[in-house]
Amino acid sequence: MAKHVLRLVAVAYVLFLLVLPVMLIIWRTFGDGLAPFAEALTSPSALHAFKVTLTVAGWAVVANTVFGVGTALLLVRHEFPGKRLLGAFIDLPMAVSPVVVGLALILVYGRFSPFGGLLESWGIQVIFSTPGMVLATVFVALPLVVRAVVPVLEELGDEQEQAAHTLGASRLQTFLRITLPGIRWALGYGIVLCLARSLGEYGAVAVVSGRLVDQTQTLTLFVEERFQNFDQPAAFAAATALALIAVVTLLLTKLLRPKDRIDGN
Amino acid sequence: MAIEVRDVNKSFGTTPVLHDVSLDVAAGSLTALLGPSGGGKSTLLRVIAGLERPDTGTVRISGVDATRLSPQRRGVGFVFQHYAAFKHLSVFRNVAFGLEIRKRPKDEIRKRVMELLELVHLEKLADRYPSQLSGGQRQRMALARALAVEPQVLLLDEPFGALDAQVRKELRTWLRRLHDEVHVTTVFVTHDQEEAIEVADTIVVLAGGEVVQTGSPGEVYDNPANPFVMRFLGPVTEIGGSLVRPHDIEISPGPVEGASPAVVSRVVRLGFEVRVEVEIGGQEAWVQVTREQADRLGLGPGDTVHVRPAPGARSLVLAL
């Protein structure tokens, strides 16, 4: 009996929170066939939003991959004062609201702050521009690559790397030929998660972008702006596109995850 | 000398691991670093390989001061206890690794790797991955990989430590024969005195971070420098304040010159040898005799016998 009740609660929970809203969005999107969907997504504003999203997410993923692998190596392979503090800081973006992140970035890089003013005088505009949006996205997606790679690096141990050194490999050769292949599945998983998080980021980007239509509008901002302006077909079409991208990345992570277990034994 | 270690000190944090260690390894020799765990033998091997940096002291390899050289430039082959196999590379590519790093021509690599795989009897498994090999096969692969770059010295850290007893014995004999074929100066770490005696031609006993004794297996076994070495190299028992090997004790039914009376407490038959446990004036001791001797003496618990160290047997007087 208890089992049936539990099952009913679980199904209802998932149904009302997840399945129903997503189904409704898809139904509303494709209610009038594929043509309105295609039309809504190929409008100049929508295409521009796609471009901005891809640019911001692309740079954020590159930055977090490089930083993530470097930090993971630092945390696992080296001892230094402040190591625990660094480890704690990595997780900070999980706890801090993205809106706070956006405001903090404006405080540092905004036109009226000393540092932001200096950059501005050199012709570099951070806030209300792509660099600021990349910074905000990098911040919110910061822990994902690090946290995916650290446990695999720990399990891998450093003996293979030491063996490579004694066989004449330099640090770079060892990293490229031994370490990187050893963490490749975990790294792929971390990158996909980071990409998904970057594509869907709203709060921090909303604050630092200034929401300038056709300039700094990402896809998530586009959805919100179209919805506020009663252009529901465009809002739903873009939302469905985001959801589809999310589903694809989710499938990718499912493909990447089990292989790591085989690799790691 | 292939390896000269001079006055090496090494601590991990506040824990001293090596204390003024000096060591010479002759070219072409097969040397065992023997000692209890925590004695510093693995650390010494890693210092020679450059995987650890000594706090003070120098390491010379083939006459060249290698103290500040990275492991990459020392010309050493290193074999780890847990194989350190490159999991994502086939057996062939594992062995070829050092040669690929040195950018040797493909044909030469192929030829050399196949030669080495034949040497370690893995030529049929060249395309397998390490996860498809047994422990013994992985360790032979690791050995071929280390030999591929023609190292000046080959260093093995407890190479058979992770293998089961049967494979261990096979690989020991095989390592000895391999060394007789290849003649590369080899140093291996072990805590198993039987392994050291069987395989090595020189044994260096390390304990508490210091070299306690160096010599051939015979010398170290027969003329131990102190009670610790004697205990570590083989079985010992105590008679009349001296440490004696249990097979160096004579048992006789009647009184003999220099013998002390003892009461048999237990007789244990272990195949060809018999372990006779006795009590000498309240002190427990044991004697190793052959089955034939035991049958001749007809020993049983409660019997009174007389025991003495065999004439010419090595014994160490224990300081009381």
Image (cartoon, rainbow, N blue to C red):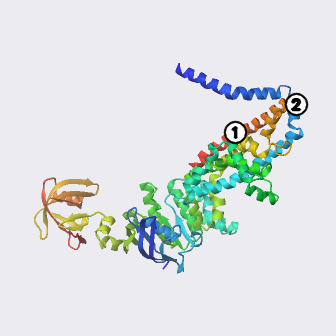
Image side of residue A190 versus residue A132, left or right = left
Q: Secondary structure at mark 2?
A: helix
Q: Which mark is residue A36?
A: 2
- Residue A75 figure quarter: bottom right
For this orientation, the residue located farthest to the left is B255
Is residue B221 or residue B19 the one in the foreground? B19
Image vertical order of residue B185 relative to residue A19, above or below: below
Chain of the residue that carries numbered disc 1 in the rendered image: A
Please say whether residue A185 is visible from this viewpoint.
no
Between discs 1 and 2, the one toward the N terminus: 2
The image position of residue A135, as x and y in percent, is 73, 51
The spot of residue B136 in percent (x, y) is 50, 57
**Residue A202, image x, y percentages:** 74, 40
In this picture, is B91 found above or below A232?
A: below
- The picture places residue B212, in percent across and down from the top left corner, at 36, 72
Judge by depth and name the residue closer to the eye, B162 or B144.
B162
The chain identifier of the residue carrying mark 2 reads: A
On the rendered structure, is A234 left or right of A165? right
Q: Is residue B271 left or right of residue B266?
A: right
Please say whether residue B227 is visible from this viewpoint.
yes
User: SS of the residue at dot 1?
Assistant: helix
Count numbered badges in the picture: 2
Which residue is identified by label 1?
Answer: A250
Q: Determine the residue positioned at 66% across, 65% down.
A: B100
Give the class, few, some or many, for how many residues have Cα within 10 Å of label 2's Cα (few <14, many ≥20). some
Q: Which mark is residue A175?
A: none
